[in-house]
Amino acid sequence: MLKTPTQQALLAYFERYISPINARAIVRSIFERAGANASNEQLYRQATASSAIYVKPEQRDELVNGLRELLLNGSAPRAEHPSSAVRLSEPNMAVSVAIRSEANLNEARLIARQMCRQAGLDGFSAQKFVTAVSELARNVAKYASPGRVSFVDDFAQRKLRVTVTDSGSGIANLDDVLVGKYRSKTGMGLGLIGTKKLVDEFDISTGPGGTTVVIAVRY
Amino acid sequence: MHSVNRVPIIRLWDLLLVPVQGDIDDAQAEELVNDVLERVQRAGCDGLLIDLSGVWTLDSHLCSVMVRLSRSAALMGARTIVSGMRPEIAMTIQAMGISLGGIQTVATLEDALAAMGVRSGRDQQDVSDDEFVRKILEPS
C-alpha cells in the first residue's frame, strides 16, 4: 500500500504536519475515495476535502497551497520551517465512542485494537491496552451511562491516551476501591484496580457530576 | 441478529465443545451461558470444553461469565476445562489479578480432550504400525 511516487510524496507532505500514522490514514483514504486511476486533479480535490476537517480554518489555505503545488504544479512544496509547521487537528487526531449500553463496548474495543495496530503495539501490550479500555467502558455502561471513551494518539510523546468520562454520581469510596478494600459483587472494584495494573499512566477524578479516568500506554 | 453471531456448541460424544471466537459481547455471552446449560441438561453431558484460542480479548466480565457457567455446569454434573488461552491473554488476566475461580485450564484442545479421557485413535494406529514394522524387522 502507498507505494507510488505520488502516494509517497503526499505521505511525506502530510507527515510534516501530523503523525505518520495519521498521515498514512489520510493518504490511504484519499486514494480509496479518488480511485486508483484518479488524475492529479481529482487527487487534489479529494486531498483538499479529506484533510480539511483536520485543519483549523485559518490553516486551511496553507495546506491547500501546498497540496496544489505538490499535485498540480508537480513541485514539492517548500519545506519551510518544518519544526513550526502548522499542526493539523487539535492537537492530535482524536476518535471517540459514546457508551450508552454494553452493546457499545465492542466498538470501543475495536477502535482500541485499531489504535494498537497503527501504533505498532501488539501481543501483550496490545492485549493490555484493549482490555483496559474494555474494563473502563464497561464500568460506564454498567454503572454510569451515558459516557464517552475518547482515544488520542499522542505521537509527540509516543503514547496512546484514552479518556473515559461518564455521567454517573461519582465513586464515593474511591480510595477504598483503589487499594482493594472495596469489591462489589459484580467486580467493579476489580475492574478499576485491574485496569490500573495494565497501563503506564492512570489518573482518576470523581465527583457528584461524574467520573473521568485517563489512561495512557507508551508505544 | 444474534442468531448469526451465536457461539456454536458442538457435541463430541458425551462432551460439549464451545469454541469461543472473536469479540464476544455481553448479550452473546449471556446467550451462550443459557444455551450451554440447556444443552448440558438436555443431553446429559459429562464435560464442557471451552476453547479460547480464537478469543480477542478476555476481560474481567467474560472471565466471571465463564466462572458462572462452569459452576452452574458443575451443579449439573458436568466438569469444565478451558483450553487454548493465548499467552498475551493469560498474562493480561494474570496482571489484572483476575482468577478463573478454580476452572481447570490446559494449553490445547488436545490436552483438554485427553483430560476428559478422550484418546486419539491415530496414536493407536501408530503404535500398531510400529509393532508391525518391528515384527518385520525382528529376526525370527
Image (tube, coloured by chain):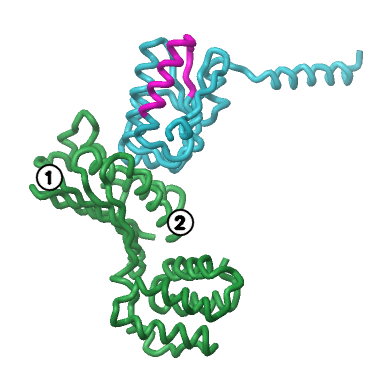
Report x, y in % for residue A214: 24, 55
Report x, y in % for residue A119: 42, 60
Q: Is residue A157 above or below residue B111?
A: below
The magenta stretch spans residue A217: no
- Chain letter of the residue beneath label 2 in the structure image: A
Q: Which mark is residue B20?
A: none
Kindly report the secondary structure that dominates the magenta region of the rendered protein. Answer: helix
Give the labeled residue for mark 1.
Answer: A170
Q: Residue at x 45, y 42 (%)?
A: B56
Direction from residue A15 to residue A191 in the image, left or right: left
Report the front residue among B85 and B40: B40
The chain that appears green in the image is A
Are discs 1 and 2 located on one and the same chain? yes
Crowding at label 1, few (<14), some or many (≥20) Cα neighbours within 10 Å? some
Give the labeled residue for mark 2.
Answer: A117
Crowding at label 2, few (<14), some or many (≥20) Cα neighbours within 10 Å? few
The magenta stretch spans residue B40: yes
Judging from the image, what secondary structure is the residue with disc 1 in?
loop
Judging from the image, what secondary structure is the residue with disc 2 in?
helix
Residue A192 seen in this snapshot: no
- Chain letter of the residue beneath label 1 in the structure image: A
Q: Is residue A36 above or below residue A121?
A: below
Mark 2: amino acid: Arg
Q: Quadrant of residue A139?
A: top left
The chain that appears cyan in the image is B
Q: Residue at x 39, y 11 (%)?
A: B76
Report x, y in % for residue A213: 21, 52
Q: State which region is magenta.
A: B30-49
Q: Residue at x 35, y 18 (%)?
A: B71
Q: Quadrant of the N terminus of chain B?
A: top left
Report x, y in % for residue A106: 37, 44
